[in-house]
Amino acid sequence: MLIKRPRGWEIPESQATPEGVWLDRRRLLKGMAAGSMLTGAAALAGCMEEAEADSGKQLAAAPAADPSAGLYPPKTNMKYRGDRPMTAEDLATTYNNFYEFGSHKNIWRASQVLPIRPWTVTFDGMVEEPRSVAIDDLLAAMGPLEQRVYRHRCVEAWSMTVPWAGFPMKRLIEYAKPLGSAKYVVMQTFQNPDIASGQKQYWYPWPYVEGLTIAEATNELAFMATGIYGKPMPAQNGAPIRLVTPWKYGFKCVKSIVRFSFSDQRPVSFWEKLQASEYGFWANVNPEVSHPRWSQATEQPLGQSDRIPTLLYNGYAEYVADLYKGMNNERLFM
Ligand SMILES: Nc1nc2c(c(=O)[nH]1)N[C@H]1C(S)=C(S)[C@@H](COP(=O)(O)O)O[C@H]1N2
Ligand SMILES: [Mo]
């Protein structure tokens, strides 16, 4: 018999894991591990098998020795609830874009080699005083983490709805102390071609860089995510810290950030350098502005059978539309 292995977005909605289920699984796991280190490890393996059998796919594990594990799961901020069925964890953590590890969706295994500790984040450029800080010290300085369920819309027209853990980007901007004259924050992904084989592909303008205006970065929706599904961020989703701007196309959400630089010059981002006619600085979601090669009118939620209409600013207009008032000469939507 020929068995067709469904692609990510073809898995029926009935298999999507509702929030309660994965939370319970996590609690179970925690409880078992607390019992004894030894049986904890065995239980973990057992639980993985169970999850694998559940979904017909291997569940991506959170990094084993993550010193920040105790911060998860954080409290849910009920203001941001996604308003759509939650995407199954094993889809969101095995169907990824992370070109550093390959230009296909199945990079999650390859990305496990990313060393997420020690991890240093640098703040420089137009700041009161440049500084570098270890990720766990930064997490401590950012105060309590929170969980927010956001929709995510990739420019390729697939989408997901996932629970991120992290803190408002505004808090990080305040911590960085930019000068009043800074207009942009520029974020850069790690660079290490020995680990990330995609970075040996010289035709890409490594490192991955993205930017926001300070007004965008301090908007209440802009979020620094350090975890997902109630756990520390797995490598493939951008450990240990990545940007989430849910009103913009997904490529703005730069992963595995090592540097925040402040500038009065608009940066040219990774995709814009590669193909400026298709990918711009603003990249706000708009169903009426087509990508030069495909329509943006609808999207395919991962794990669901039917496409759904795409919304202006991905449905977040009430939060962000004012940011772009009077900018009619800008290419706001690509
Ligand atoms: N460093 C880096 N960040 C990146 C990318 C990338 O290739 N490299 N891909 C972007 C794109 S196109 C999308 S849609 C999202 C995907 O995030 P996810 O894999 O967590 O769904 O990450 C964004 N951030
Ligand atoms: Mo994307």
Image (tube, rainbow, N blue to C red):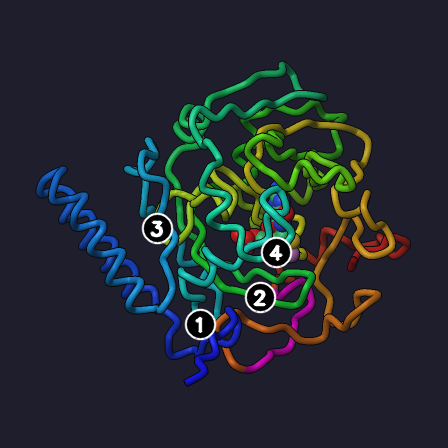
Mark drawn on residue 230: 3
Which sits in the foreground, 223 or 157?
A: 157
Taking the image as shown, residue 265 lies to the left or right of residue 80, namely right
Asked if the stretch drawn in magenta spans residue 314, the answer is yes
Q: CA distance from mark 3 to mark 1?
A: 17 Å
Label 2 packing within 10 angstroms: few (<14), some (14-19), many (20+): many
Residue 218 in sight here: no
Q: Say what amino acid the circle numbered 1 marks.
A: Pro
Q: CA distance from mark 4 to mark 2?
A: 16 Å
Query: Mark 2 or 1 closer to N-term?
Result: 1
Q: CA distance from mark 1 to mark 4?
A: 25 Å
**Residue behind mark 4:** 104
Q: Which residues are magenta?
A: 306-315
**Residue behind mark 1:** 85
Q: Residue at horizontal 30%, vertical 61%?
A: 22
Relative to 94, does residue 219 appear above or below in the rendering?
A: above
